[in-house]
Image (cartoon, helix red, strand yellow):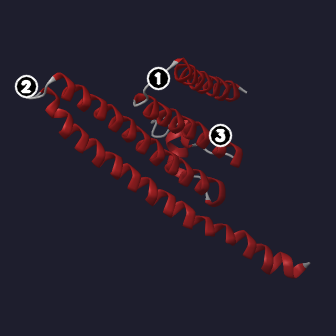
Amino acid sequence: MNFLDKVFEPLIWRSRFVVLFAVVFSLGVSLLMFYMATVDAIYMIGHALHYYSPELNGAARMELRAVTVTHVVEIVDGYLLASVMLIFALGLYELFISEIDIAKESANGNEKISSNVLMITSLDDLKTRLAKVILMILIVRFFEQASGMEFHGALDLLMFAGGVALLGLALFLAHAAEKK
């Protein structure tokens, strides 16, 4: 038993640092997604500036509007995905490596740097926070698909309404679970 206490247990305890790979690469993916969504936003703004052009007729203006709305949804989706990766990286770090001291210091003082979203105390807490952001990504994706949907009959409209009702139910359940 002495061998286990002196050699093996410290080795097992230090093996938690392998999580740093996941933290570093998740943070890198998060930064990359923030960069990509920002570049998309800049290009979208450049294209949207043509909306005012008197050369556009009504149909072309409506098409530009539809494309712009789709791009906005894609940008929101990109930022949400970047946020998921950031929350995942910070959560893994706090769970397996160490608490983030600067977040604790700012929480103890009057200065508020971080929100409760970044305070992870357990794997269940991390999963819950990630699930909420992923739910938002799914809602944005639904909106993206719905914005280009053409209704050809009552069944299409009924399916769309069912999808909206299911999203509402998912949000209600997520909010109800948060209160517990």
Residue with the most extreme top position: 154
Give the label, 3 or 2, closer to the camera: 2
Q: Are marks 3 and 2 in contact (CB under 8 Å)?
A: no
Cα–Cα span, label 3 and label 2: 49 Å
* Image vertical order of residue 171 relative to residue 119, above or below: above
Q: Nearer the viewer, mark 1 or mark 2?
A: 1
Instruction: Name the amino acid, label 2.
Output: Pro
The residue type indicated by label 1 comes to: His
**Which callout, 1 or 2, points at the residue further toward the start of the chain?**
2
Task: Report the quarter where the N terminus lies.
Answer: bottom right
Expressed as whole percent of the image width and height from the top left, the position of residue 172 reads 64, 23
Neighbourhood count class around disc 2 (C-alpha, 10 Å): few under 14, some 14–19, many 20 upward:
few
Q: Which mark is residue 128?
A: 3
Front residue of 150 and 39 = 150
Residue picked out by circle 1: 152
The image's mark for residue 139 is: none
Mark positioned earlier in the residue sequence (3 or 1): 3
